[in-house]
Image (spheres, grey):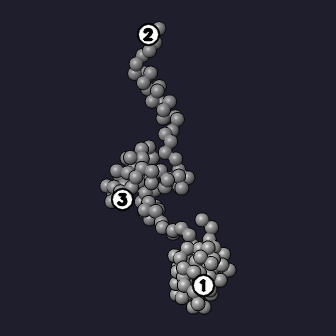
């Protein structure tokens, strides 16, 4: 949702501060909600500034807080599945996160948990050697 212009904010606060109208009347006049007028007036009284506040959070993810330990675990066990990392993080660090959280963390790090194609080929060759299919022909 776009923010209202600084000019509109200043006009709304100035109209209210003249003391001749109520918040409800100012809200109707400028076509904003009563809550918005109240919030702008309170912001101006507290800070003498009406610039819009920044939107969003600056929260750091739980895995990002333990980045070095998590990366060490991944380097130690590169072929684990996400659920295995989940269990290991719970045991070692006491962090209870979902597999989606782990996936998103790895994606931000530019990592993927795709299993190597060569490992799959080697496994297939081993199975073929164990079961000698040449006898069937």
The location of residue 53, given as percent across then percent down, is 57, 75
Residue projecting furthest to the top: 137
**Could you say which disc has been placed on residue 136 in the image?**
2
Mark 1–mark 2 Cα distance, whole angstroms, equals 89 Å
Q: Is residue 6 above or below residue 2?
A: below
SS for dot 3: loop
Question: Considering depth in this image, is 126 or 57 the residue closer to the camera?
Answer: 57
SS for dot 1: helix
Question: Considering depth in this image, is 2 or 84 the residue closer to the camera?
Answer: 2
**Could you say which disc has been placed on residue 95 in the image?**
3
The location of residue 45, given as percent across then percent down, is 54, 88
Between circles 3 and 1, the one closer to the viewer is 1
Q: Is residue 66 above or below residue 133?
A: below
Residue at point 35%, 57% (across, down): 96
Query: Which residue bears the numbered disc 1?
Result: 13
Q: Earlier in the sequence, mark 1 or mark 2?
A: 1
Q: Earlier in the sequence, mark 3 or mark 1?
A: 1
């Amino acid at each position: 949702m776009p923010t209202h212009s600084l000019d509109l904010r200043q006009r709304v606060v100035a109209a209210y501060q003249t003391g001749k109208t109520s918040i409800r009347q100012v809200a109707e006049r400028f076509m904003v909600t009563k809550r918005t007028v109240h919030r702008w007036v309170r912001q101006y009284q507290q800070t003498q500034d009406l610039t819009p506040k920044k939107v969003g959070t600056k929260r750091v993810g739980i895995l990002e807080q333990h980045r070095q330990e998590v990366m060490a675990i991944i380097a130690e066990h590169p072929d684990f599945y996400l659920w295995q990392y989940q269990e290991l993080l719970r045991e070692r660090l006491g962090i209870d996160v979902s597999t989606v959280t782990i996936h998103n963390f790895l994606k931000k790090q530019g990592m993927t948990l795709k299993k190597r194609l060569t490992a799959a080929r080697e496994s297939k060759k081993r199975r073929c050697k164990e079961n000698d299919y040449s006898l069937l022909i």
